[in-house]
Image (cartoon, grey):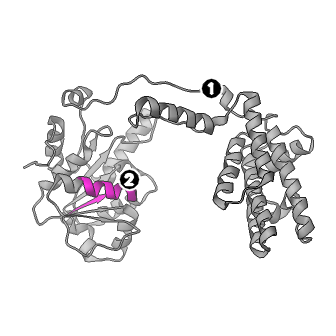
Amino acid sequence: MLSTSTPLRAYQERIATQASKKNALVVLPTGSGKTLIASAVMKTLDPKSRTLMLVPTCLLVAQQVKSIASETNLRVVPYSGDLSVPSEAFDVLVSTPAAFYRICCTQNEKFGLSSFALIVFDEVHHVVKRHPYRKISKLVQMLPSHQKPQILGLTASLTYAISNEEMDKSIQELCAELDISKILSSTAQELFQDGYHAARVPVEVKCDQKLEWIPPRMSSAFGVHQVREEFFAQVSTRVAHPLSLALMNRIETLENMITTHDASFISPLQRKGKFGKVTNWGAYAHGRAIKSNQSVSNMYNQLEDLYEAVRIAVNSRQNDLELSFALLRMMEQIRGQPSSLLTTLHDTFDLYCETHGCYGRLSSLKQEITSSLKNFGTLFRGIVFVH
């Protein structure tokens, strides 16, 4: 008999009843009670049977353990890579797939797939990707028919495919992979009548072109080396973004200061080969900071942060300069080393934003979120599209 602490809605009871009889996929929107349905199916099993519930992340392990335990009188235990293998008896094991797969590889009979009567795949669409779910589904396929556990898949979206042809192919592959007999869902009318009301509020789309950093030249560079050379060519001819020029000026000043204390220092920005690679600039300064005395080490730390800021500017073709300056502010707070050199740089950034009426994407996003929090409290939902 279906029973959970929270009474099942009509569509949940219908789906749970069908899912308890054969391998099934449950496709329902977020917040419509997929975990509750899975809990109800677990309760239909023989009291001596055990369930394995697989979830993609450690955060979801804790969440699902709490949810299932509150809805059933079953003994529910968590397992993930940061936890020891459960030694106590349990009715339901909630685990990340990678952690459970490692147990399977040890051939521990207590955790053999055939020792479970039911396996629940939360966010089951991951099965058809290069994901630990797929490894476990392959192990299930290798079991003799009489040892195979029942399968229950949960998802809000069956596939990432876009075209109808790709969607059909992906769904067929998913069903074949898990030997699925039924795909269970509900109509929008059913959901609405049974009390599932997705929030219907006006949607605002904020897309202000002023928030984008405009590169001074259309970039024709594609390879990493080309992008680096293009950046330095623009700096040397003074046509780079004003904020890029400000960064490079500070680097030149700081490198000259360091040279007076460390004659062996060679700027990686002027070097070729491995030591001249953009990705190695910060590491080079970091390595020298470790070997230097306190005063010189502090200068190297600042130089490391400036190199990393320029790396962001180079790799983004000067489109993400706000991130460069956000990194500098963050690292200055972390290191607890205020610098007049960096302070003037922050002032340059603030003045540029104020003069051009452009406060960048991060600042504008912060303003939008702050405004939404004031208007809606914590009950609002937003989508941030990033390039």
Q: Which mark is residue 8?
A: none
Does the magenta portion include 55? yes
Q: Earlier in the sequence, mark 2 or mark 1?
A: 2
- The residue stretch that appears in magenta: 51-67
Can residue 95 be seen here? The reply is: yes
Residue type (three-letter) at the residue carrying disc 2:
Val
Nearer the camera: disc 2 or disc 1: 1
Image coords of residue 109 (percent x, y): 25, 76
Q: State the quadrant of the C terminus.
A: top right
Q: Residues within 10 Å of mark 1 (few under 14, many from 20)?
A: few
Residue type (three-letter) at the residue carrying disc 1:
Asp
Give the side of residue 57 with respect to residue 10, left or right: right
Can residue 223 be seen here? The reply is: no
Q: Residue at x 73, y 38 (%)?
A: 350
Q: Which mark is residue 208?
A: 1
Indicate whether 224 appears above or below 184: below
Give the side of residue 215 with respect to residue 122, left or right: right
Q: Residue furthest left?
A: 1
Q: Residues within 10 Å of mark 2 (few under 14, many from 20)?
A: many
Give the side of residue 191 with respect to residue 246, left or right: left
Which of these two is toward me, 266 or 171?
Answer: 266
Q: Residue at x 67, y 47 (%)?
A: 326
Does the magenta portion include 3? no
Image coords of residue 52 (percent x, y): 26, 61
Give the side of residue 126 with respect to residue 44, left or right: right
SS of the residue under disc 1: loop
Q: Which residue is mark 2?
A: 127
Indicate whether 298 appears above or below 23: below
